Amino acid sequence: MIHHPQRFVDVILPLPLPGKFTYSVPEEMNGELQPGVRVIVQFGKKKFYSALIHRIHNEEPSGYEIKSIETVLDKQPVVHPELFEFWEWIASYYHCSLGEVMKAALPSGLKLESETRVIFNPEFEEDKNDLSSRERLILTFLRIRKISSVSDLNRADEKGNAYSVIKSLLSRGAISVEESLRSGYKPRTETFVRLAEAYSGESRLTELVDDLSRAPKQQELLMRFLEYTRFGNEEAIPEYSKKRLLEKVGTTTATLNTLIKKGVFELAERRVDRLSQYAGNIREGFELSQAQEQAYAEIEQNLEEKQVTLLHGVTSSGKTEIYIRLIKKYIQENKQVLYLLPEIALTTQIVQRLKQVFGDKAGIYHSRFNDAERVEIWNKVLNFDPESDENQYQVIIGARSSVFLPYRFPGLIIVDEEHENSYKQFDPAPRYHARDAAIVLSHLTGARVLLGTATPAIESYFNALSGKYGLVELSERFKQIELPKILTADLRDAYKRKQMRGHFTPLLFEEIEKALEANEQVILFQNRRGFAPFIECKTCGWVPKCKHCDVSLTYHKHNNSLVCHYCGYTIHHPTNCQACGSNEINTKGFGTEKIEDEVSLIFPEARIARMDLDTTRARKSFEKIIHDYDSGKIDILIGTQMVTKGLDFQNVSVVGILNADNLLNYPDFRAYERSYQLMAQVSGRAGRKYRQGKVIIQTSEPDHHIIQQVIQNDYLGMYKGQLAERKHFKYPPYYRLIGLVLKHRDKREVERIANQLASMLKRSFRSRVLGPEDPVINRIQNWYIKQFWLKIEREISIVSAKKKLQEILDEVKTQPGNSGVQINIDVDPM
Ligand SMILES: Nc1ncnc2c1ncn2[C@@H]1O[C@H](COP(=O)(O)OP(=O)(O)OP(=O)(O)O)[C@@H](O)[C@H]1O
Ligand SMILES: [Zn+2]
């Protein structure tokens, strides 16, 4: 007997557990396995997971009984094993498990778990002969139930393990997995016609054509099929789309079916590319202005010398056109390019602009895409072949998670609006920052990174000034249009003089009126959605609060409800105060919905749209609002921070910031930096094409230094001021922050454990510990919350700091009575 070496694999399981998991390889699978391939393994009593092979080796682990792999799902890796180094960095830096990184990285179509729900696709045209008996059984099971968990399907399967069957049914489009349901997944399959094996020879065919002379329709169909598939030719194709064949020949399915019955033709179900194709015209990029040319040349130079370059270009300076030129260059070098965007609100316009230049070479990847589409992009990126001329995605435009796509030849990563905090994932782990992750990825792969923004993050500008990053400044707008004129409107004064109309000062009101008269457009920014942040009884001061969270409920007028923005808890607007019974209840504060309401009263002729979380839940809603506004169907656009950045409209002459105070007064060490960024960005939407625009900032502190800096376009002044504060109060970029969040169902318990943790932390970290503190919202979904901050000097090794921290947390969690606490670590919290 030949003795095979017993082999083992370490796999990554999609679980928040540290460490790797070792399984043995059954002999028949020897040789089939590679790192990056998915396998099904059993973990725990009944649970099966699709895990990723991380390493193959011969080192038998000791101390426990080792299980063997159940099934192998892939022939080829779905992740290049070189990328594991990137995953390991994410796991170690952001302090989470490799399994959590895997969960964030892979689209859910590539991650079957016992709990994953599988859904029958009613549109699937089943061809019995194409399915194995196990596949048919599972499909029948699903047809009856419509939806079922993987573990139920395992039970239904004759071998007790349905993974490979599910995978095959998924690839045929017969079923889909859970996420797809939400996005209205419709798998696209197409039926193809091919010759049956028996008729594949030329002589049999000639005979057949003669035989069919008495059935002219069938004969014609056959002849035309042979023509279209170029039968006998060198470039012959084996099959032809059924739909197109019938259309072109102009015959019925009956004719085709007869030929199928006679055994001449067979049908095959094929999945066709679901990603939509670009049908518009392709344009060359614009010719760059002199200032753009110069910036471009400097960027090129910097990219040669530095890993990371920051392009600091004022709003509407034409950064996007510079990116386009750069992308072209990398495409010519057969490299892949990633264009990161912080939010989907922005993708609509950018995608349009990039598609016009790059056509089908540009692919989009974000959470609004259904799962099948995401898997397709994943595979296209995975299989990118620099030598091939085929249409491939060479430019990926994507949000945060597209940093995890399996690039093999990345040349350039552009991080647009690099200052945006939505690049940071808050929950769940990995709590990574996509900009910083992209920079690490570039170090590992040799790609270069270009950060671009009109308002750099303090940290990025710091790195640029210190020489760590290259720095390119572009200080004029395209066409040398002047930056908008910014005026303040004093809220306190206007209220005192009783000049306010709703939430509009006379100045803002007049400017809107003028713009409307001139047929120009207006953008109004308010950083809260809903009608009013809370309501209050006029008699006793009672404020309705969420049952599960420590926040007041936001009033939404359109459905007369009170909603918790943290957990979604919703009640009807009460008619009476629940404390004193009074029926006089006032709304307090204001959100975008209220502004919309007021605008429609104050400017009854104006056409209005609102863009916030509530109006953009549907997949295409952004596109519609942006398109309508762009094409002049809307005069006034009201929105939250969604309207503030990156959008490029030609005809906006006035921007109104309804209340700058609530930006400035937010309790966070970044509040001033963010206020500056928000105000400068939203101002930048005005006057982009024809002439200087106008911005009105309503505030009760017109002399506030941040507002003055916005008015003077004094980024550097803001930067220096903030940097001094950061140094003094020990914040980034001088110190690293690690946030700790403790949650417990019991208020007193979370306090007790937080105090316990505090004394342990202080023993090791001393004055670097801040806390325990109450966060702004100290109860969310019935979890009571306490937080800590650790401020770690740059000179101290963050690795050992985190190690120490983990030891302390492990000790706290294992103390008697502490099992109910959850502790999250957030490295570089935003
Ligand atoms: N070289 C050029 N030729 C023609 N049009 C240009 C050129 N450069 C920029 N533009 C146009 O000027 C406008 C502003 O450019 P762009 O949107 O690239 O600015 P940006 O720097 O990205 O601004 P923001 O930071 O505000 O997003 C766009 O409408 C763009 O099409
Ligand atoms: Zn709530």
Image (cartoon, rainbow, N blue to C red):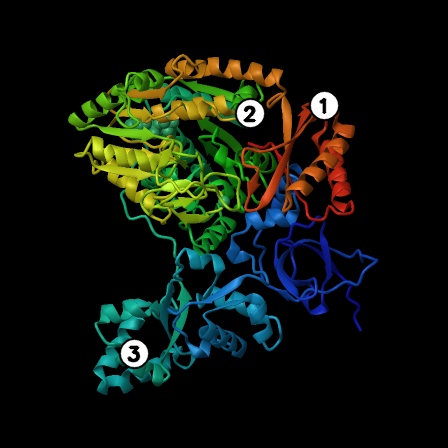
Which comes before the other along the chain, label 3 or label 1? 3
Q: How far apart are marks 2 and 1 (CA)?
A: 37 Å
Given residues 570 and 342, the one toward you in this image is: 570
Whether residue 412 is visible to the viewer of this picture, yes or no, is no
Query: Reading the chain from its start, which is encountered first: label 2 or label 3?
Result: 3
Q: Is residue 60 left or right of residue 393?
A: right
Q: What residue type is labelled 1?
A: Ser
Crowding near pointer 1: few (<14 within 10 Å), some, many (20+)? Answer: few
Give x and y (percent) for residue 102. Answer: 60, 49
Q: Is residue 543 above or below residue 128?
A: above
Q: Earlier in the sequence, mark 2 or mark 1?
A: 2
Badge 3 amino acid: Leu
In this figure, what is the number of numbered marks?
Answer: 3
Q: In this view, does 612 lie above or below 767?
A: below
- Disc sitting over residue 306 in the figure: 2
Crowding near the residue tagged with mark 3, few <14, some 14–19, many ≥20 C-alpha atoms within 10 Å:
many
- Kindly identify the residue that appears in the image at 57 percent across and 14 percent down: 724
Q: Name the residue under label 1.
A: 767
When the figure is inspected, residue 492 is found, relative to residue 94, above or below; the finding is: above
Q: Mark 3 points at which residue?
A: 256
Q: Where is residue 358 in the image (x, y as percent from the top left)?
A: 36, 41
Q: Quadrant of residue 4?
A: bottom right
